[in-house]
């Protein structure tokens, strides 16, 4: 799984399926359910860490990077609004770029965030005080029985880096599409804003090394990076894993790190921060 994770490390899974076709995915989910085979959605691999053990079952990775289309207008929309249907396998960078070229505003804050649209919806990804749920109108998914379901934003509970869908146990759903409501804007202004956001990321975050973005969620009223830096972890290594000297809430693979290096460093960080600050940091990275 090292080839399918932005951490550039990972164990082995029994099988992996990649598809962006809705009918294929429905058939797959029904087959997995009928044969009681365990499965896991891995999205774009930007927020996961697959342990070194052998994983039985199937990992599902969505395709459909070009699955972006303008949907029919709704009754409550104005001429300045645009409804956008986006496949869950669409790369976030591709989506932001498409919106910029077509003069659609509302997702610029996502510029520079890796991963897929489905993964971003599932974890309610965001930055700079915004989250992807703000622009969502509805979400389509397939449940573990292979049924296609859909819910409007008002029936989905979104919170910080989390989403809860009606009637769905955690992890037992496969998001297939999101419907966004965006506003028409000036292409040059949007492009300039995206460049500004990406430059801010480059100045504050590590580039060129394997990582999964923010490792821990920010605790209420504080920042995980500040607590980790205060605990003296900037630049600290554990095996081939290192806390980034640029941003303390990033762990990077310096080359050849195994998952246990990263997990061990995370455990040390949590222990020390709890000891010093009384705060138990909650992982943002999903360990599989």
Image: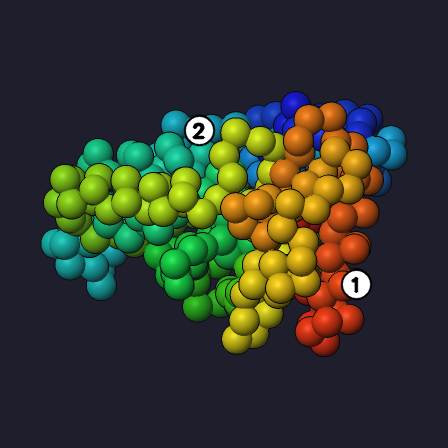
Q: Is residue 77 left or right of residue 165?
A: left
Q: Is residue 147 visible?
A: no
Contact check, label 2 and label 1, Cβ < 8 Å = no
- Which residue matches tag 2? 65
Q: Position of residue 182 (x, y in %)?
A: 26, 52
Q: In the image, what residue occupies the spot 44% across and 68% down?
A: 154
Q: In the image, what residue occupies the spot 79% across and 55% down?
A: 268
Q: Is residue 205 left or right of residue 94?
A: right
Quadrant (top left/top right/bottom left/bottom right) for the C terminus? top right
**Residue 51 occupies which quadrant of the picture?**
top right
Q: Position of residue 234 (x, y in %)?
A: 63, 50
Quadrant (top left/top right/bottom left/bottom right) for the N terminus? top right
**Secondary structure found at label 1:** helix
Q: Does residue 63 sit above or below 230 in this rendering? A: above
**Secondary structure found at label 2:** loop
Residue 160 numbered mark, or none: none
- Which residue matches tag 1? 271
Q: Nearer the viewer, residue 96 or 163?
A: 96
Q: Position of residue 188 (x, y in %)?
A: 14, 40
- The number of discs equals 2
Q: Does residue 253 sit above or below 196 in this rendering? A: above
């Amino acid at each position: 799984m090292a080839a399918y994770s932005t951490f550039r490390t990972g164990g082995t899974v029994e099988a992996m399926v990649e598809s962006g076709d809705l009918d294929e995915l429905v058939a797959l989910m029904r087959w997995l359910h009928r044969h009681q085979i365990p499965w896991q959605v891995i999205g774009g691999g930007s927020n996961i860490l697959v342990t070194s053990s052998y994983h039985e079952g199937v990992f599902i990775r969505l395709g459909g990077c070009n699955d972006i289309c303008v949907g029919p207008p709704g009754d409550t929309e104005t001429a300045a609004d645009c409804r956008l249907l986006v496949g869950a396998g669409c790369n976030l960078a591709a989506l932001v770029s498409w919106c910029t070229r077509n003069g659609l505003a509302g997702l610029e804050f996502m510029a520079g965030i890796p991963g897929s649209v489905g993964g971003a919806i599932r974890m309610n990804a965001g930055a700079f005080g915004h989250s992807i749920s703000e622009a969502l109108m509805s979400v389509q998914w397939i449940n573990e029985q292979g049924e296609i379901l859909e819910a409007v934003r008002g029936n989905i509970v979104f919170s910080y880096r989390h989403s809860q869908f009606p009637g769905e146990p955690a992890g037992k759903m496969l998001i297939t599409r999101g419907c966004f409501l965006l506003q028409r804007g000036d292409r040059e202004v949007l492009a300039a804003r995206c460049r500004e956001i990406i430059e801010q990321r480059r100045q504050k975050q590590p580039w060129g090394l394997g990582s999964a973005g923010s490792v821990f969620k920010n605790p209420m009223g504080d920042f995980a990076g500040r607590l980790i830096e205060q605990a003296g972890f900037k630049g600290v290594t554990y095996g081939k894993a290192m806390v980034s000297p640029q941003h303390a809430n990033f762990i990077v693979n310096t080359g050849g790190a195994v998952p246990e290096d990263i997990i061990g460093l995370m455990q040390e960080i949590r222990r020390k921060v709890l000891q010093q600050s009384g705060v138990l940091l909650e992982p943002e990275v999903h360990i599989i």
